[in-house]
Amino acid sequence: MNRWVSRLLVVLLLVAVTASTADAQRRSRRRAIVTQSGPTYGAHVGYNFDVDDLLLGAQLSWPLTPDLALYPTFDYYFVSGGSLWALNFDLKYRPPTRYGSWYVGGGLNWLHASSGGVSGSDTNLNLLTGLEGRRGRTRPYVEGKFILGNGSSFQIVGGVSWR
């Protein structure tokens, strides 16, 4: 029963973030898009379907060009009986689209787990895609990420970035 409640909360959060992004896209159709350069930072919550637990994280997006950015993130997974966290070192690319809110990316994932006094690390490959608001100082986003390697998994996160 507890898992269903946590899953429902994640789905509701992701729907809210997606709806606010869609609303921002509709408003931007009436106006020209003004993109602002510079780093953004933020926080996110999500759900990893293979670990079967919630996660909380933080991210930084540091533009190298208008379409390409360094995208390091940190994720902490709420697992029982131990700890599990990941550092992600990704690149994020915005293909030329009408509104510029869609992005794709990839990079390295360093996963660290400990349980019962035993700890270990694993390195994996990340593939990700998402939608992010492009106007204003507060930018909501939603993202899906495949973590490929030993113990592959899929997770969805939603959050807010600030300029």
Image: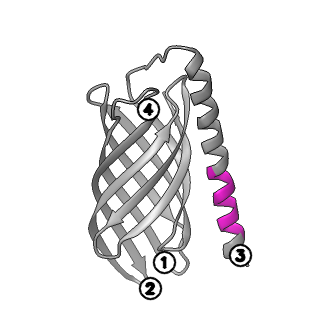
- Residue at 65% x, 49% y: name it: 15
Which residues lie in the magenta part?
A: 5-14
Specify few, some or many for label 2: CA neighbours under 10 Å numbering under 14, 14-19, or 20 or more: few
Q: Is residue 66 above or below residue 17?
A: above
Q: Where is mark 1, residue-wise?
A: 82
Asked if 63 appears above or below 56 in the picture, the reply is above
Pointer 4 residue: 40
**Distance from label 3 to label 4 (Cα)?**
34 Å
Residues 23 and 159: in front is 23
Q: Which mark is residue 2?
A: 3
Q: Quadrant of residue 118 in the image?
A: bottom left
Left or right: 29 in relation to 13: left
- The type of residue carrying mark 1 is Gly
Residue type at numbered disc 4:
Thr
Q: Are marks 3 and 2 in contact (CB under 8 Å)?
A: no
Compare marks 3 and 1 and give the one earlier in the sequence.
3
Relative vertical location of residue 8 with respect to residue 16 in this rendering, above or below: below
Whether residues under marks 1 and 2 lie with C-beta atoms below 8 angstroms apart, the answer is yes
Mark on residue 54?
A: none
